[in-house]
Amino acid sequence: MVHQDNVRIPRPAPGTTDIYNYIVELLTRALAVTEREYGSLKVVANPETTPQQRQLMNLSNGNTDIAWSITSAERESRYTPVRVPLIGGLFGYRVFLVRADDNRFNYAPSLPDLKAMTAIQGANWPDTHILQFNEFSVLGTYGSGHMLLHRKMFDYFPRAIHEVSQELLEYPQFTLNVAPQLALKYDNPMFFFVSKKHPRLAERLTKGLTTLYNNGEMLNLLTQQPFYADAEEMLFGREIYVLQNPLLTDETKAALAQFR
């Protein structure tokens, strides 16, 4: 449950500090603009870092009040989504980590050629199912995709465009580059999630975020972030292949039409 005047959120994982700080600031503002109606809440991070899937599970066991994640029909069935995209459409763009000596990516491969290669993704990531639905060859793993790419176990590693630069800094032991010519795009919104036991908290977050969206404060905050500017620069001049996301509910599709 929400404990008195505190609302508990996950602790940041290594390498996610910039986005984490943006999300926390956005959450803090959403709570602030709804304080008159709902009362004061202080945002408090849990003491230990946990993997994303555990962060969502912690909503059910009462160890966390608010988490955030890429959405899917399965996640929306387990938890209550707050259907206001937190970083616009940015999470829908994927660029490829490749081996530095792999010259197949010096130019943009055709879509059929790309599908003939093998990508890697996390075994339980929604992106794995999205790529498979679009007829890509995908290897799901519970291990380090960066290490497996370095060892030539597959051809490329699709990564979120706003995260990939930081990942290159985190894995200097592997000789990897970002393929320069292409990107994928599909609707892939990140939402806040809360336990189904707390509909009032979900209602409050929806009202707060909608207010910030309508008055332009959310967009202004997002476009001030260095990761947003880096992503826009990285997208410039790329061939973009648009894919379908079969994991979105009708309610989420309607929300995406509203919050463009």
Image: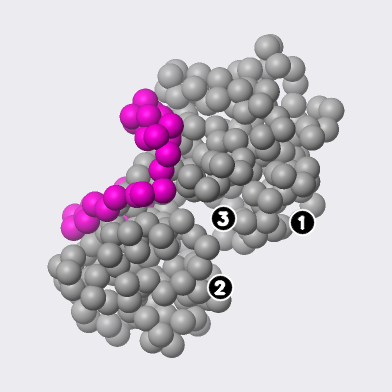
**Which quadrant of the figure has residue 8?**
top right
* 12 is higher (above) or lower (below) than 79: below
**Residue shown at 70%/16% (left/top)?**
38
Residue 258 highlighted magenta (yes or no): yes
Can residue 25 be seen in the rendering of this structure? no
Q: Which amino acid does label 2 sit on?
A: Tyr
Q: Earlier in the sequence, mark 1 or mark 2?
A: 1
* 104 is higher (above) or lower (below) than 181: below
Residue 196 left/right relative to 126? right
Say what secondary structure mark 2 lies in.
loop
Provide the residue designation for mark 1: 48
Q: In which quarter of the image is the C terminus?
A: top left
Alpha carbon distance from label 3 to label 1: 15 Å
Binning the other alpha carbons within 10 Å of mark 2 as few (below 14), some (14 to 19) or many (20 upward) gives few
**Which quadrant of the figure has residue 111?**
bottom left
**Residue shown at 23%/75% (left/top)?**
116
Between 210 and 246, the one nearer to me in the picture = 246
Residue at the right extreme, as displayed:
4
**Which quadrant of the figure has residue 139?**
bottom left
Provide the residue designation for mark 2: 142
Residue 61 left/right relative to 19? right
Between 119 and 108, the one nearer to me in the picture = 119
